[in-house]
Image (spheres, grey):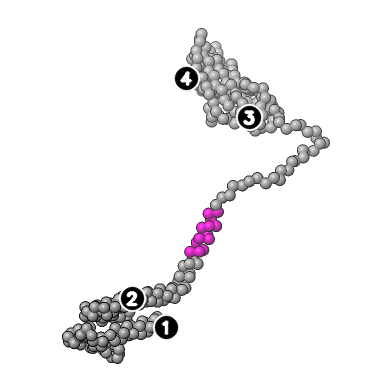
Amino acid sequence: MPAAPTAADTAAQQPVARGRFRQATVQVGEIIEFELTSSHAPALEIIFPDSAASFAPFEYVSRRYRPTRTRQGRSLDQAVYRLRTFSLDSVLTLSVPVTVLRGRDTLLLPTAPARVRLQRTAPALEPAAGPPALRQNLQALPVATRFNYPYWLAGLGGLLLLAGGLVLGFRQRLRLRYRRYRLRKNHAYFLAQYARHVERFTLSRSLTNMERAITLWKNYLSTLTSFNITSLTTREIVARYHHDPAVQQALTLADRVIYGNQFSEEDAETDPIFDLLRQFADRQYERVIMQEGE
C-alpha cells in the first residue's frame, strides 16, 4: 500500500508562489518592479528570496514586503522587488526560487517564468543600411583649474636645495661679510660714545669724564682684539701694544693728571690724550679689518 503524500509533496506538485512584472515593457537600465505573491495553507512556511538570490538576467536593486495576512484559512505573502537589466534580448524571462519549510523538509521551488518585453530606444536599421553615422562634437568644455601640488613641491624642494648649496658654498664669505659688518657697526658706536665723553670733559673739565672716556677705550680694544686689557696697568698695556708711542704718551699723561693731581682747568696738555687714543683705536680697527680679509 503506497504511503500517503506529505505536505511537502503536495507543495511540490502545486505552485506555491507566482511572480509577474508590473509593466509590460522595460528599457535598458530602467528599474522595473517584480511582484511575488504566495497564497498557501497557514501550516506551510514560505521564504521569499533575498538580495543574495539570483535574478538573472536582472540585477537586484531593493525590496519591500508586507507581513503575512491570514483570512478564512489561507495565508497571503507578498513582496515587490525593484530590478533592472542591461540585457539586449527582445524578451526577458525571470523565475525566482521560493523556499518551503515544514519540519525537517526543505524544498526549493522555482516560480513559473514571467516575461517582459525589452523596449528599444534606438531605431531599427536594415541590414544593408550599415551602421549609423556618428555625430562629432568638437566644442571645448571648460575645465576647472587645479593647483599642481607635485610641481610646486618639487620646485620648492629645488629652491631649498639651491639655497642650501649656496649657503654651503659661500658660508665662509658670508661669515666674513657679517664679521666685517659687526666690526664697522661697533667701531662707529665707539667713536660716537667716545666723542660724547670728550665733549663732556671739554665743557666740564671733570676728571670723571676723562676716566669714562679711557675706560670706554679699553673696553672697545678688549672687544676688538679679543684680549681683555681693562685690568692691566699702564705699563702692561704699553708692553701689550709693543710700546706704541701714542699709547705710551697718552696713558702716561692721563696717569699724571688723574693720579698725580697735576691738573688745572686751564691746562691744555690734556687735550692730546683723547686724540692719541682715538687714532690708535682707528689703526687697530684697520689692522683687524685687513686681517679678516686675508
Residue 79 in sight from this viewpoint: yes
Amino acid carrying mark 4 in the image: Gly
The magenta span reads 148-160
Give neighbour class at mark 1: few <14, some 14-19, many 20+ (Cα, 10 Å): few
Q: Nearer the viewer, mark 4 or mark 1?
A: 1
Question: Residue 288 appears at what percent x and percent y?
Answer: 37, 82
- What's the distance in space between the residues labelled 4 and 1, CA to CA? 108 Å
Q: Nearer the viewer, mark 2 or mark 1?
A: 2
The secondary structure that dominates the magenta segment is helix
Sequence-wise first label, 4 or 1: 4
Q: Nearer the viewer, mark 1 or mark 3?
A: 1
- What's the distance in space between the residues labelled 2 and 1, CA to CA? 28 Å
Amino acid carrying mark 1 in the image: Glu
Q: Nearer the viewer, mark 3 or mark 4?
A: 3
Q: Are marks 2 and 1 in contact (CB under 8 Å)?
A: no
Sequence-wise first label, 3 or 4: 3
Give neighbour class at mark 3: few <14, some 14-19, many 20+ (Cα, 10 Å): few
Give neighbour class at mark 2: few <14, some 14-19, many 20+ (Cα, 10 Å): few
Task: Please tell me whether residue 43 is drawn above or below residue 270 in the rendered image.
Answer: above
The secondary element bearing badge 4 is classed as loop
Q: Which residue is mark 4?
A: 103
Q: Nearer the viewer, mark 3 or mark 2?
A: 2
Q: Residue at 28%, 79% (x, y): give it.
A: 198
Q: Which residue is mark 3?
A: 30
Camera-side residue of 259 and 82: 259
Sequence-wise first label, 3 or 2: 3
Amino acid carrying mark 2 in the image: Ala
Sequence-wise first label, 4 or 2: 4
The furthest residue to the front: 266
